[in-house]
Amino acid sequence: MKTIRRYLYTDVVTAVAFVTLGFLALFFFFDLVDELRWVGRSNSGYQVTQALGFVALSIPGHLYELLPITVLIGTIFVMARLAQSSEYTILRTSGLGPWRALQMLLTLGMAFAVLTFAVGDYVSPYSERAAQLVKARFQGDLTTGQTGAWLRERQGNDAFAVNVQSLSSDGRMKGVRIFAFDDRGFTLAMTQAEGAIFGPGAAWTLQGVQRSEFHTRGLERARVERQVKDSMVWPTRISTEMVAAAVLQPDKMPTLDLFQYIRHLDANGQSAQRYEIEFWRKVFYPLSCLVMVVLALPFAYLHFRSGGIATYVFGGVMAGISFFLLNNVFGYIGNLQNWLPWLTAAAPGIIYSILSLTAFGWLVLRR
């Protein structure tokens, strides 16, 4: 069985690698064509070299999204080819039963799942952030919408609403506004800063500060104190990752940072539905590689005419694309309809698991 396992694993890994490289090359070409429209505009200094760097840094993100699909296509191709050449029939007569074949593919699928998780949790977030910083260095600051990112935090009985207009390429915050409220909901202070940096410790260092304090307790008439400072240290638990999460897309964050950001939102009474769905998607998405190899196994038990293998490979491509679309559609619908986050994220995998097991039971076990 070691020989059969080595032979099967080599063929599947080679096919998956070939399909993955093909898709990545296609995405690289499309991204580069789209990015070339920004080259040479005004005096930003954004040239072809920077565009190539930005597109190259976006490859890990595409790899994370494509791996389950390419695993399905590559495994279907290998299984169908083995069936067409009658090699799989020989393997069956050598003792490769359905359950043993399923066990082999699930082991390989688990390896692909670990690879998908590693790329999505360790490589893709940092490469995506580096890509955005490359673009920000030549085209402007990172921002979200016209008002920037908004965050909330509680410190004792006081609440704070924080607005960050944008992030510069060196990680510095620009256009910072901090609103402080007491337990009655009255405004205690408003702080505006031209910029801010993270640190020292659990604090921000504000620069170019204009601060207005509103005194309303125990006074017949409200009083406002205004201060202008070159710098000011504001203690806060809002970290770099939290600000980046508010500015960048949540699906580009590592799982642990996303979990901590969800806890921060919950602790401060903010809606975390969108981020919870993304968190559970990052948990379940790598496991879809297991579903894909199970879905591909029945193709080894089909009978092919000459040249018929292309039809089944095309069917595998359509199945992979439909899984990707279904995964995105459930995310949007779950966010709009306020579905359970874990169920929203797991639903596409559950649907395809049922299809995989049905196909396995009908084409493999019953036949």
Image (cartoon, grey):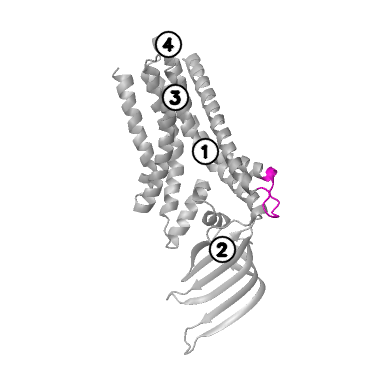
Query: Does 360 appear above or below 221?
Result: above
Q: Which mark is first along the chain, 2 or 3?
A: 2
Question: Which image quadrant: the C terminus?
Answer: top left
Q: Nearer the viewer, mark 1 or mark 3?
A: 3
Q: Which mark is first along the chain, 3 or 1?
A: 1
Q: CA distance from mark 2 to mark 1?
A: 30 Å
Residue 320 appears in which quarter of the rendering? top left
Q: Amino acid at mark 4?
A: Ser
Residue that mark 1 sits on: 64
Q: Which mark is first along the chain, 1 or 2?
A: 1
Q: Amino acid at mark 3?
A: Val
User: Does the stretch in magenta take in 46?
Assistant: yes
Q: Secondary structure at mark 3?
A: helix
Q: Which mark is first along the chain, 1 or 4?
A: 1
Label 4: few (<14), some or many (≥20) within 10 Å? some
Residue that mark 3 sits on: 313
- Labelled disc at residue 164: 2
Q: Amino acid at mark 1?
A: Tyr
Q: Which mark is first along the chain, 4 or 2?
A: 4
Q: Is residue 128 left or right of residue 69?
A: right
Mostly what secondary structure, the magenta segment?
loop
- Tell me where the magenta segment starts and ends, as one range: 39-50
Marks 4 and 1: CB-CB under 8 Å? no
Q: Amino acid at mark 2?
A: Val
Q: Secondary structure at mark 2?
A: strand
Marks 1 and 3: CB-CB under 8 Å? no
